[in-house]
């Protein structure tokens, strides 16, 4: 059967010799977005101006807001344009901090959240809020029993759990989380940045009070994000200014980036088809890796995951070294181990799932996208095997030697 997306793939590499497999970090511009940038840039006026030069940009923003609201199942006025997911996440916690009165000073976050939420929550803790983390299972799914035990009826102000994890792709049981949180009188926020463009997302069906999104994960320009705020949910601006976004986010809007996100939202009909193709490629990639490279395991295997994401544990290697070697071979991937010179710290997400430091430092994240092809997968698997064999040889790693994960260190 012919590939349904053949001929409509998005070019993702800067040269024909490179393959981009890091779509969780960011996505390339959709070619139709790129082709319309000059047209949108002609609407250069300030959208807050009432003269003719301001009316064009204002219309662009209105069209984008309507398209995004439609794809998310929201009312257009429930959407606030921001600079991206991190700002949207911070805006939620700032609002809760401002409006939560005694005794509602308790916040619950999953232990798998993005740093923009965790760091904001730490600031709330310094301001006197009681912040707790919800444990996660080794599978990457949060522990619902731990959530239930930590909920404080009448005291928990907010529960925040990301819809899909940016490292493992594991999708959380958000409907059950919302049900439990609402029963305790808490509001619910979800960081849905990774889900947008990969799986359908309907905020009304999810039942959340807040949801964060970012355009650059969905083949749009960087610099545009959206925060969904359900009617009646409290909101305190992070940025004060003029009357932009109905006084909810001051500052002249990034019209060009917003227009690009609105355009991608208008292509919502492609998401299901594209997701099926990405899932096929991901499953094929994982099967080939498991059959050709010994002792590899998949984080979140068996759980509901984004169709785009593979998180691999490859003992006998170091994730950062592997990433750099693959980059030199022409492949862009990422690692769950946030290693940097002098500070080889493993991924907090993988540690929160119960992986050892050694396991977390052997991780590699591969993210396929709308432009990934079977040829890309074939080339990558062959190269990955070559790199892994070389690194394992340097370390003297013997296949099957691990009886317990903690017996091996990924570091040289």
Image (spheres, rainbow, N blue to C red):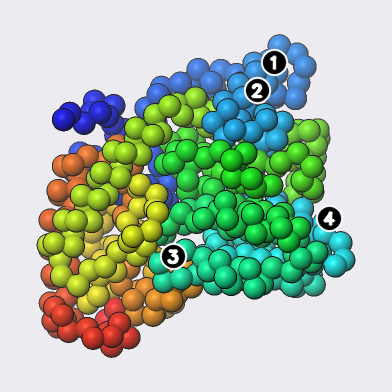
Q: Position of residue 235 (x, y in %)?
A: 78, 47
Callouts 4 and 1 close, C-beta under 8 Å: no
Callouts 3 and 4 close, C-beta under 8 Å: no
Q: Which sits in the foreground, 380 or 240?
A: 380
Callouts 2 and 3 close, C-beta under 8 Å: no
Q: Which sits in the foreground, 410 or 195?
A: 195
Q: Position of residue 158 (x, y in %)?
A: 71, 59
Q: Residue at x 62, y 39 (%)?
A: 204
Sequence-wise first label, 4 or 1: 1
Q: Residue at x 69, y 15 (%)?
A: 55
Q: Position of residue 201 (x, y in %)?
A: 52, 40
Q: Is residue 234 above or below residue 260?
A: below
Write down the residue under mark 3.
140
Sequence-wise first label, 3 or 1: 1
Sequence-wise first label, 2 or 3: 2
Q: Locate the C terminus and report the quarter of the image it occupies.
A: bottom left
Q: Residue at x 26, y 68 (%)?
A: 297
Q: Is residue 36 visible?
A: yes
Sequence-wise first label, 2 or 1: 1
What's the CA distance linking mark 2 and mark 1? 10 Å
Foreground mark, 4 or 1?
Answer: 4
Q: Is residue 44 visible?
A: no
Write down the residue under mark 4.
99
Tag shown at residue 55:
1
Q: Locate the N terminus and report the quarter of the image it occupies.
A: top left
Farthest-out residue, right: 102
Foreground mark, 3 or 4?
Answer: 3
Write down the residue under mark 2.
62
Q: Which sits in the foreground, 246 or 350?
A: 350
Sequence-wise first label, 4 or 2: 2
Foreground mark, 2 or 1?
Answer: 2
């Amino acid at each position: 059967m012919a590939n349904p997306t053949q001929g409509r793939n998005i070019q993702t590499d800067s040269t024909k010799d490179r393959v981009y497999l890091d779509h969780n970090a960011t996505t390339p511009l959709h070619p139709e977005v790129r082709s319309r940038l000059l047209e949108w840039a002609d609407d250069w006026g300030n959208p807050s101006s009432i003269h003719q030069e301001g009316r064009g940009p204002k219309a662009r923003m209105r069209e984008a807001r309507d398209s995004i609201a439609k794809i998310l199942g929201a009312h257009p006025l429930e959407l606030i344009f921001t600079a991206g997911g991190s700002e949207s996440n911070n805006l939620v916690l700032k609002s809760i901090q401002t409006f939560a009165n005694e005794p509602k000073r308790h916040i619950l976050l999953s232990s798998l959240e993005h740093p923009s939420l965790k760091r904001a929550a730490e600031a709330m803790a310094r301001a006197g809020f009681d912040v707790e983390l919800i444990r996660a299972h080794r599978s990457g799914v949060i522990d619902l029993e731990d959530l239930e035990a930590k909920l404080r009826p009448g005291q928990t102000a907010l529960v925040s759990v990301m819809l899909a994890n940016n490292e493992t792709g594991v999708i959380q049981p958000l409907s059950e989380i919302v049900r439990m949180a609402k029963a305790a009188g808490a509001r619910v926020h979800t960081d849905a940045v990774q889900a947008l463009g990969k799986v359908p997302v309907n905020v009304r069906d999810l039942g959340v009070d807040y949801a964060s999104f970012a355009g650059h994960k969905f083949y749009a320009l960087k610099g545009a994000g959206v925060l969904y705020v359900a009617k009646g949910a409290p909101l305190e601006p992070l940025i004060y200014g003029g009357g932009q976004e109905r006084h909810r986010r001051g500052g002249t809007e990034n019209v060009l980036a917003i227009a690009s996100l609105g355009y991608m939202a208008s292509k919502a009909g492609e998401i299901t088809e594209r997701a099926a193709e990405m899932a096929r490629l991901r499953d094929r990639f994982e099967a080939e890796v498991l059959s050709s490279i010994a002792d590899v395991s998949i984080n979140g295997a068996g759980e509901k995951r984004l169709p785009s994401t593979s998180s691999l544990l490859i003992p006998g290697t170091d994730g950062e070294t592997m990433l750099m070697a693959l980059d030199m071979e022409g492949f862009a991937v990422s690692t769950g181990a946030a290693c940097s010179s002098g500070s080889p710290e493993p991924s907090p997400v993988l540690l929160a799932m119960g992986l050892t430091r050694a396991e977390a430092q052997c991780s590699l994240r591969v993210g396929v996208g709308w432009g990934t092809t079977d040829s890309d997968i074939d080339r990558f698997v062959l190269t990955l095997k070559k790199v892994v064999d070389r690194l394992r040889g340097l370390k003297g790693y013997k296949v099957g030697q691990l009886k317990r994960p903690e017996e091996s260190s990924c570091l040289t």
